[in-house]
């Protein structure tokens, strides 16, 4: 009962085996990419943010890549401060003034 398979059937079995290996490798890479992206920046938060003396935080809003603080200084002037949440570095500021 150990008949030898025709050549074209042996080639077909080899192609199916190779495609199965490629499929498994791609499935593993796809799973790795999903896990890597889900765990990318999670949990990284700046320990402190430097404010000017006399400034108080009135409000805060956040997005995926920045935190916006509404600040008021001792003179009553207000500004928006844009911060990178991972590093605590200032990305810029906008002064809020009343229209004339």
Image: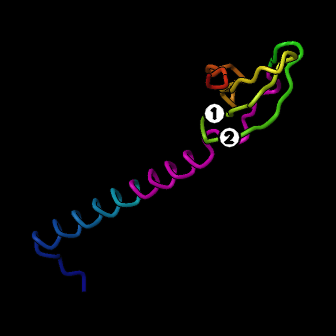
Q: Quadrant of the N terminus?
A: bottom left
Kindly give the residue lying farthest to the bottom in the view shown: 1
**In-front residue for pair 15/61:** 61
State the separation of the CA atoms marked 1 and 2: 6 Å
In this picture, residue 39 sits left or right of residue 9: right
- Residue drawn at (67%, 22%) of the image: 97
Image coords of residue 48 (percent x, y): 82, 24
Q: Which residue is mark 1?
A: 66
Q: Are marks 1 and 2 in contact (CB under 8 Å)?
A: yes
**In-front residue for pair 86/59:** 59
**In-front residue for pair 31/43:** 43
Residue 37 magenta-highlighted? yes
In this picture, residue 84 sits left or right of residue 46: left
**In-front residue for pair 89/5:** 89
Mark 1 neighbour class, 10 Å CA radius: few under 14, some 14 to 19, many 20 or more: some
- Residue 62: numbered disc: 2
- Examine the image and state in which quarter residue 11 appears: bottom left
Image coords of residue 6 (percent x, y): 11, 75
Image coords of residue 88 (percent x, y): 72, 24
Residue 78 magenta-highlighted? no
- Residue drawn at (62%, 41%) of the image: 63
- Examine the image and state in which quarter residue 26 appears: bottom left
In this picture, residue 86 sits left or right of residue 27: right
Which contiguous range is marked in magenta?
26-49
In this picture, residue 96 sits left or right of residue 26: right
- Examine the image and state in which quarter residue 64 appears: top right
Q: Quadrant of the C terminus?
A: top right
Classify mark 2: helix, strand or loop. Answer: strand
């Amino acid at each position: 009962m150990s008949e030898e398979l025709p050549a074209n059937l042996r080639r077909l079995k080899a192609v199916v085996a190779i495609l199965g290996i490629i499929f498994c490798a791609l499935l593993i890479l796809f799973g790795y990419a999903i896990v890597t992206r889900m765990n990318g920046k999670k949990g990284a938060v700046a320990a402190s943010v430097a404010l000017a003396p006399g400034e108080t935080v009135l409000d805060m809003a956040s997005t995926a890549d920045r935190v916006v603080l509404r600040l008021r200084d001792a003179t009553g002037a207000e500004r928006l401060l844009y911060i990178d949440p991972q590093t605590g570095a200032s990305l810029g500021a906008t002064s809020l003034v009343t229209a004339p």
